[in-house]
Amino acid sequence: MESIDFLKEKLELLHDICPYLEIKYEYRSYINTHIIEVKPIHCFEKDIEYVNGQILLEDDFEESFPDEEILFITDNELISVENPILELGILQDDCEYDLITPPVIAEYSMNNSILYGVDSTMPYEFEIPIAKHNHWWNRPFKNKKDSEQYSESFFL
């Protein structure tokens, strides 16, 4: 339990330095490994402040607990934190959420003025013309010559 408390304390300090990180920590006793998942991936790979903090934490941990392993991971890894004993920077299920109220529905009259709660508005209906295709096979034959021309183009 000493190593778990040590890591919890150090991870909280690391999160205080980099509060934009999401950190999950899990200890797997059957492999004697402490797994720490850090997100987002770009901070895990490129944030100098975080990387320096991780290196210092690993060095301190390995000096204090040489018989135990520590593993830092991020997104897109084959292993993940399944049963975290510490979560930092992650929304918890017990937090309260504000409900978003739907917008007020406004009705428009014929002169485009907004009417709130007025029952006298009438819906405005209009038709949208859709062009019909005037294909040659839909046109009536005017004479025998037109008929022969269409049948010849059909067999080309």
Image: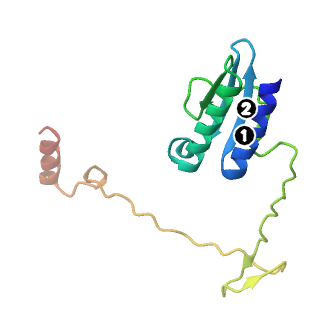
Identified at 17% across, 56% down, the residue is 143
Task: Give the residue number, with chain letter if any, for mark 2.
Answer: 25
Counting residues from the start of the chain, the first of labels 2 and 1 encountered is 1
Callout 2 crowding tier (Cα within 10 Å): few <14, some 14–19, many ≥20: many
Please tell me whether residue 55 is drawn above or below residue 2 in the rendered image.
below
Residue 45 image offset from top left, x and y in percent: 51, 41
Residue 123 coordinates in the image, percent (x, y): 71, 74
The crowd level at tag 1 (other Cα within 10 Å; few <14, some 14-19, many 20+) is: many
Left-right relation of 45 to 117: left
Q: Which of the image's four quarters has the N terminus?
A: top right
Q: Quadrant of residue 124?
A: bottom right
Relative image position of residue 51 (x, y in whole percent): 56, 43
Relative to residue 125, is residue 97 drawn left or right?
right
Q: Residue at x 53, y 45 (%)?
A: 42
Give the residue displayed 74% in from the left and 27% down from the top.
26
Q: Residue at horizontal 45%, vertical 63%?
A: 130
Would residue 35 be seen by someone viewing this image from the given angle? no
**Residue where numbered disc 1 is placed:** 11
Q: Going by the image, does 142 lie left or right of 152? A: right
Question: Can I make out residue 43 in this image?
Answer: yes
Q: Amino acid at mark 1?
A: Leu
Quadrant of res 75: top right
Asked if marks 2 and 1 touch (Cβ < 8 Å), the reply is: yes
Q: Position of residue 53 (x, y in %)?
A: 62, 43
Tell me the kind of residue under disc 2: Tyr
SS class, disc 2:
strand
Specify the quadrant of the image occupied by residue 131. Answer: bottom left
